[in-house]
Image: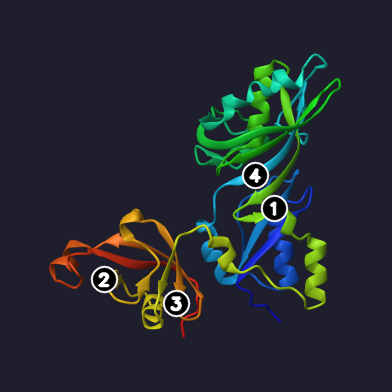
């Protein structure tokens, strides 16, 4: 018998599992097909992997984009994959490195920067995944991508022949921590590779409240499994509340004039047009879905369908609540 859940699982991805492995396992555990993840983690990474179920899969594209990682970078070693899964390219003793000298380079990675993804990655070049080309022994020029690193701080240092630096990285989407390790190693002159990686925050979820696959299996077996509310994943969005009658109309796909009574919770001029908004039912507190404010199209404005003094409408981008 299939299950019907509409929410999120804050999964702590185990080592050596792909993100797809985790999705496939949870699908079998819940006997439920409509499950997706909110951000790929490499097999050698662990940590927060948000899984969306049922109607919550519609919300994946609206999740917060910032992520936080705890990474261990090993100096004096380079590999084909920029982590310990690859073949060794170079190896040297790097006992001369000092923590202060290495961390002095960290400010160069802050803010918006141009980053070249690893050759073994899912990035597409010329219509093909880079890891497919790498496995075929092909090399291509990889165009750099713009990424954002908000914060980068040293958390620990392990001295030795191949010293290791532990970093906390708060970054935007598309950032490759393996590339950061590689580039930092080039800066200090010894080369470096990513030795360990854990994602501690992702899409509004954190490692402290995550559950392992074993935790999930036990909760399901004992009928104690309750998914995280879909509302938790979109709390970062500004809220707009609708009266019950407007809520029903909006969920049916109707456009609403912002001049109508029954809409509250937002001063339109403070939100740019096209901004995603969290739409709530004023009477029940239910989460209805994701909407946005748009300018009134000229044809509608000329027909005087809306208040010309407030030429904005609320449209539905994603309806979450089931429509009767």
- Viewer-nearest of discs 4 and 2: 2
In the image, which disc is placed on residue 48?
Answer: 1
Q: Quadrant of residue 319?
A: bottom left
**Does 156 sit left or right of 243 as displayed?**
right
In the image, which disc is placed on residue 259?
Answer: 2
At which x and y percent is residue 243?
A: 39, 79
In the image, which disc is placed on residue 20?
Answer: none
Dots 4 and 2: beta carbons under 8 Å?
Answer: no
Q: Residue at x 19, y 73 (%)?
A: 305
Tell me if residue 103 comes above or below residue 174 in the rendering: above
- Viewer-nearest of discs 4 and 3: 3
State whether residue 136 appears in this view: no
Q: Residue at x 63, y 31 (%)?
A: 179
Q: Secondary structure at mark 2?
A: loop
Identify the mark nearer the N-term, 1 or 4: 1
**Circle 1 residues within 10 Å: few <14, some 14–19, many ≥20:** many
Q: Which residue is mark 3?
A: 282
Dots 1 and 4: beta carbons under 8 Å?
Answer: no
- Real-space Cα separation, disc 2 to disc 3, in angstroms: 17 Å
Identify the mark nearer the N-term, 2 or 3: 2
Tell me if residue 309 comes above or below residue 49 in the rendering: below
Q: Which residue is mark 4?
A: 68
Tell me if residue 320 comes above or below residue 209 in the rendering: below
Q: Secondary structure at mark 1?
A: strand
Hey, which residue is sitting farthest left in the picture? Answer: 302
**Circle 4 residues within 10 Å: few <14, some 14–19, many ≥20:** many
């Amino acid at each position: 018998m299939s299950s019907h859940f509409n929410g999120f699982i804050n999964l702590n991805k185990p080592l050596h599992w792909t993100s797809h492995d985790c999705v496939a396992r949870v699908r079998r555990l819940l006997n439920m097909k409509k499950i997706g993840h909110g951000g790929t983690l490499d097999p050698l990474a662990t940590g927060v992997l948000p899984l969306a179920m049922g109607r919550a899969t519609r919300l994946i594209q609206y999740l917060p984009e910032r992520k936080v990682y705890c990474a261990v970078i090993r100096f004096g070693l380079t590999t084909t994959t920029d982590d310990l899964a690859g073949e060794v390219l170079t190896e040297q003793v790097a006992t001369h490195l000092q923590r202060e000298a290495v961390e002095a380079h960290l400010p160069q990675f802050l803010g918006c920067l141009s980053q070249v993804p690893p050759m073994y990655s899912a990035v597409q070049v010329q219509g093909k995944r880079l890891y497919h080309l790498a496995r075929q022994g092909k090399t291509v020029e990889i165009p750099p991508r713009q990424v954002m690193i908000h914060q980068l701080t040293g958390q620990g240092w392990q001295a030795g022949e191949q010293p290791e630096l532990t970093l906390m990285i708060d970054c935007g989407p598309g950032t490759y921590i393996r590339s950061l390790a590689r580039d930092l190693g080039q800066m200090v002159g010894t080369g470096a590779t990513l030795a360990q990686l854990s994602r501690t925050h992702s899409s509004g979820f954190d490692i402290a409240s995550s559950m392992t696959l074993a935790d999930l299996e036990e909760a399901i077996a004992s009928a104690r499994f309750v998914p995280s509310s879909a509302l938790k994943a979109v709390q970062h969005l500004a809220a707009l509340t609708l009266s019950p009658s407007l809520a029903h109309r909006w969920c049916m796909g109707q456009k609403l004039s912002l001049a109508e009574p029954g809409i509250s919770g937002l001063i339109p001029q403070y939100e740019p047009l096209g901004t995603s908004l969290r739409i709530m039912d004023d009477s029940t507190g239910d989460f209805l879905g994701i909407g946005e404010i748009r300018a009134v199209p000229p044809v509608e404005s000329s027909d005087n369908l809306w208040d010309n003094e407030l030429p904005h409408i609320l449209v539905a981008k994603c309806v979450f609540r089931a429509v009767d």
